[in-house]
Image (cartoon, rainbow, N blue to C red):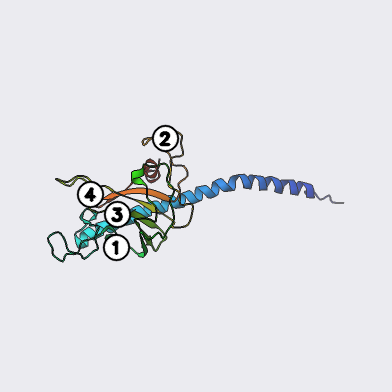
Amino acid sequence: MTKRFGFTLAEVLITLGIIGVVAAMTMPTLMNSTQGAQYKAAYKKALSALGQAVTLNVALDDSSFADTDAGTAGSADAAGTNKDIPTIGSILNARMNVVKVTKGDGVGYTITDASLPSATKLSQAGTNTTLFFNDGITFTFVAGDKGCSSGLAGTADNICKGYIDVNGAKGPNKVVSCSNANATAENCVAENPTDVYPVKFYNQTVLPNSPAARAVLYGK
């Protein structure tokens, strides 16, 4: 008579239980890592797209962030001529796929950012302007910002600031932060990228504007 070897029901249930416990412990970490990688990729894409948009505008219309005014595009310039005066919004709207714009009408959502100086804080309501792009990314900046420049002869630096939100109104709407204790600008490590990134922009340049945002971009 041939003997048949196999697992008992109790052994199968114990094995499945162990697999379930291991999965429960590792899945959250794996999901956070995957989501963080998506945020990081979208952030780099957004920075590149904004930079390419203003560079293209310089090539086609000979105007960058340094040439912007806070008025309406098409209004008269200081000399009284009917010259098109670009704004931050009009430059990006002309070169990117903007599907919606909110302008200080209270529409939008709040970005929580307790870690940054008050000078860099923005929300997607109040007096700020938010551009919604067709890929789900949003860009928020102070509605009255103009003449965003640095290094121009005879003028003071006027660095403009804003936020990139890589997934729009979808949560967590949390500004990226350093994950290591007592982090400084030099040793910040952002192990868990989130969806909101402070940026600064001037002339033809768009750059990260916090230690954590820089750490994500440059891979620290």
Looking at the image, tell me whether mark 2 or mark 1 is earlier in sequence order: 1
* Mark 1, residue position: 95
Mark 3 / mark 1, whichever is N-terminal: 3
* Badge 4 density bin: few <14, some 14–19, many ≥20, Cα 10 Å: many
Mark 1 and mark 4 lie on one chain; the one further toward the N terminus is 1
Residue 197 location, x and y as percent? 39, 49
At mark 3, the secondary structure is: helix
- Front: mark 1 or 4: 4
Q: Residues within 10 Å of mark 2 (few under 14, many from 20)?
A: some
Residue placed most toward the observer, 56 or 168 = 168
Q: Which of marks 2 and 4 is nearer the N terminus?
A: 4
Q: Name the residue under label 3.
A: 51
| Res 209 visible | no
Other-residue count near label 3 (Cα within 10 Å), few / some / many at <14 / 14–19 / ≥20:
some
Disc tally is: 4
Q: Which amino acid does label 3 sit on?
A: Gly
Residue identifier under label 4: 149
